[in-house]
Image (tube, rainbow, N blue to C red):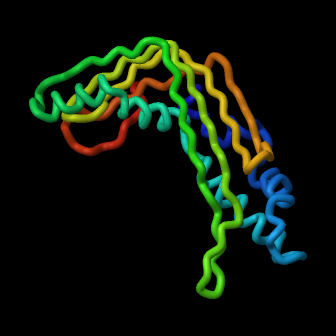
Amino acid sequence: MISSTSLISLLFGTDDAKAALPRRLGPLLVDLPAGSVAADLATEIATAVTDLLDMPLGRLALEAWAKHRRVRWACEQTRKQPRRREVVRLAAHKVTVTQHPSVELALAGTTRRLLTLDLVIEVTVTVATLIVEYGRIAEVRPGSATAEATLSAGDVRLAHGALERIELPALRRPSDGGQSELRRAS
């Protein structure tokens, strides 16, 4: 299920990303001093990258849905009329997220970019029904989906993964108009 699938597990599968990434990043970090300092820095960079990638795929889809024109309209309507509830049905669609995080080294008052990553994530959803209340997505009733992600640095592919026939979790926020987090529906 996508709810238990983080981006890092999609990219690295069962491999330990914290062990695999330093080896893959090593050749890209040519500006680092030689020896154990470089190895320690590569490990620190790998830890920072794995922390960045440790997020549920469902959150990415939710953030993308919140930008959809019909969902924004529903949010506006329910913000104006707090007791109003809007149902937005999205047919088969693809959510694509592209990010370009960078790793910088701050040393002796100067900052130097060591690495820029390219992250592309695609989640293809068969159908999703979103319930909008109090100006935000309150509930998600999704169908099945597939996911694919690629992490690269320039022309070097660091990781790639794909999952077929995954189920998106049903999510629900309490209908109190507060800012509580989405939770898995029971």
Quarter of the image for residue 7 reads: top right
Where the N terminus falls, by quadrant?
top right
Q: Depth check: give the residue in front, 134 or 171.
A: 134
Find residue 175 and report its horizontal and vertical position in percent: 22, 32
Q: Depth check: give the residue in front, 5 or 116.
A: 116
What residue is drawn where x is 56% and y is 19%?
Answer: 145
What residue is drawn where x is 78% and y is 43%?
Answer: 157
146 lies left or right of 178: right
Find residue 21 and report its horizontal and vertical position in percent: 78, 53
What residue is drawn where x is 30% and y is 43%?
Answer: 180
Where the C terminus falls, by quadrant?
top left
Q: Is residue 20 above or below residue 114?
A: above
Find residue 108 and report its horizontal and vertical position in percent: 64, 87
Q: Is residue 89 above or below residue 40?
A: above
Task: Please identify the residue farthest to the front as the structure is shown.
Answer: 155
What residue is drawn where x is 11% and y is 28%?
Answer: 83
Task: Please identify the residue farthest to the bottom as the structure is shown.
Answer: 108
